[in-house]
Image (cartoon, rainbow, N blue to C red):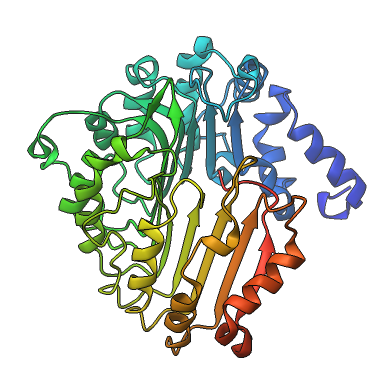
Amino acid sequence: MLHSQLPNETWDTIIDFLHSDHPSLVVCSLVCRSWLPTSRYHLFERIVLRSQHNQQKFLRSTTGMTLQNCTFGGYTHRLEMYGNCAKSPWVPDRTTLFPWDLCEAIISRLPLFSAITSLHLSGINWDQMHAIVVPSVMSIFWNITELDLTDMLWEDPVCLIEFLVAFPMLEQLRICAGGLTTNDSPERVACYKLGTRLRRLVLKAILIESRVANFGYLFKWLLMQRPPLDYLEIDMSFHSPMVFSGGLADYIGFIRNLRDVRHFVVAPPQMERSITPSQPVLDLSHWTNLRVLHYRQYPSDVLYPWQHHLQQSISKIQQLQELRIQLSFGLYDSTSLNAVFHWEELDNVLSNLPNLNVVQFALKGIESETADLKGEKRLLSYKLPRCTSRGILSVTEVVDDYV
């Protein structure tokens, strides 16, 4: 029977076996070329190496493969590698994360998947992987466009910068890290040039081994690169005033030298009422292309300084179309929604923005004996009457945190 006359059930059975761990079927080029329908290419789109079982499965599946007979390697576009060393609160069960005992064997198979454009590394010990993984990854995946580095502790930011510049095609970068502290001069990395395609940047400081990331040095380097970003997200909510004070000038300098940002997400550090930055930390008036501003905060931890600068900055962004404010109230939070902003001033500012069509408040942790979502909606409608009359105000509840 010709393969084109096979019933659909037979196709599915063949492809399901093809996707198994049996090397005899996996390496069969006849099956790969003639029996793999377009609708099933998604089965090979992503490789996930999380546990030792995943490692062994990957090695069995690629046994005997070469660049000539690995047909589906060209359809694999994402690689995810998870380690077991990041002592992060976001990794609840580290026993499920694999040791790198098969690391060299895995790296030897990666050239089969040089079409990969998305790379995700999570919980990796940089010192442990540097000698084996880094040179191979940097040489094999030169065409990476999306890079995600999550739950990683970096002792030296220069190592991170050296890694980033190995991907000249990079368009999206996400760094969720701890550490990155150094006293070195920025001139040390002045020779490292970032690719010119970076459009999306996410920087999130987290706590790993009692160390929060200090992005100050990275801000200085990015300032020299001037990437053409249109999406920028900076989460510094884990910072205390003392930790962040040294990097505030670097952050402001980086922000001031961007011009093309259209979507900005910011989660400020945890400052006290009495600590008011002398400089306008949210002066975005020069961002003539900014359309969406998403502001996230724990109101009790940082009440006045950043909100004050936010209101001042918004008044100058005439082209703004969407303002999204996410407020997370703690379990023992005594701050009410009523005390977060100078509401009359905010309402006046928003009513004078001609292009604004969305004002959204996303609230988390408001359920209590004295507050609920309906009540907060009524409160905001009362506090922002001009926005309410224009029909642009909405209030939602956040179920999951924005981690």
Please determine whether, in this image, residue 212 is positioned above or below residue 254: above
Answer with left or right where residue 204 lies relative to residue 375: left
Answer with left or right where residue 169 lies relative to residue 72: left
The residue at the point 43 percent across, 75 percent down is: 291
Q: Residue 89 at x, y = what percent?
A: 56, 27
- Viewer-nearest residue: 25 or 167: 167
Q: Residue 230 at x, y = what percent?
A: 37, 65
Q: How many marks?
A: 0
Residue 47 in view in this figure? yes
The residue at the point 37 percent across, 64 percent down is: 308
The C terminus sits in image quarter: top right
Residue 194 in view in this figure? no
The residue at the point 33 percent across, 20 percent down is: 130
Q: Quadrant of residue 377?
A: bottom right
The residue at the point 48 percent across, 22 percent down is: 86
Q: Quadrant of residue 159?
A: top left
Q: Quadrant of residue 376?
A: bottom right
- Viewer-nearest residue: 310 or 345: 345
- Viewer-nearest residue: 189 or 171: 189
Q: Residue 329 at x, y = what percent?
A: 60, 49
Q: Residue 108 at x, y = what percent?
A: 45, 21
